[in-house]
Image (spheres, rainbow, N blue to C red):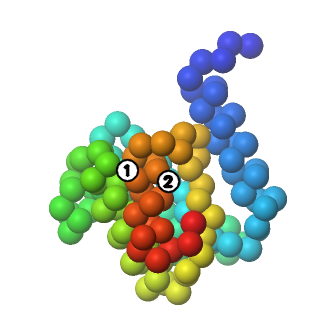
Amino acid sequence: MANNKRTLFLKRRLRVRNKLRKVNPGLPRLSVHRSNKNISVQLIDDLQGKTLASASSLEKDLGIVGSNNLEAAAKVGSAIAERAKAAGVTEAQFDRGGFLFHGKIKALADAAREGGLKV
């Protein structure tokens, strides 16, 4: 079987998600998605099947519409930390999906931690 980028990405995503389910199934999941132009994050409660909070670089009030750089990732991370506090969540599991914990993903996680969210 050929291991192209997409296949490796999907394998990584499943591996990360399954580990999160085993380690602490009661905590909400901070799920990150990154595209070439934007970055978004959701705080998901898997037990209820609901999204508790979300933030994206597409939101006009963050002032970073259409940008996908370290600064945008940091702003999205701090926004999700504020919204998580408003939703009453102080601790979550960081679900990086199939993305490597480097660059924009790391900047988002660090900004969420600085905002008071335990990830």
Give percent across and percent down for residue 26: 74, 74
Residue placed farthest to the right in the image? Answer: 22
- Looking at the picture, tell me which residue is in the foreground, 20 or 47: 20
The three-letter amino acid code for the residue at tag 2 is Val
Residue 32: numbered disc: 2
The three-letter amino acid code for the residue at tag 1 is Ile
Image quarter of the C terminus: bottom right
Give percent across and percent down for residue 55: 38, 64
Give percent across and percent down for residue 70: 32, 48
Callout 1 touching callout 2 (CB < 8 Å)? yes
- Looking at the picture, tell me which residue is in the foreground, 81 or 107: 107
The answer to whether 13 is drawn above or below residue 72 in the figure is: above
The answer to whether 23 is drawn above or below residue 102 in the figure is: below
Q: Residues within 10 Å of mark 1 (few under 14, many from 20)?
A: many
- Looking at the picture, tell me which residue is in the foreground, 86 or 49: 86
Residue placed farthest to the top in the image? Answer: 2
Please give the name of the residue rendered at 76% of the width and 68% of the height, measured from the top-left corner.
Answer: 25
The answer to whether 99 is drawn above or below residue 79 in the figure is: above
Mark positioned earlier in the residue sequence (1 or 2): 2
Q: Tell me: 111 left or right of 58.
A: right
Asked which secondary structure carries label 2, the reply is strand
Q: Residues within 10 Å of mark 2 (few under 14, many from 20)?
A: many
Q: Quadrant of residue 94?
A: bottom right
Asked which secondary structure carries label 1, the reply is strand
**What whole-number distance in Å separates the C-alpha atoms at marks 1 and 2?**
8 Å
Q: Tell me: 102 left or right of 39.
A: right
Can see residue 49? no
Please give the name of the residue rendered at 56% of the width and 23% of the height, measured from the top-left corner.
Answer: 5
Residue 39: numbered disc: 1
Give percent across and percent down for residue 103: 42, 43
The answer to whether 97 is drawn above or below residue 88 in the figure is: above
Can see residue 81? yes
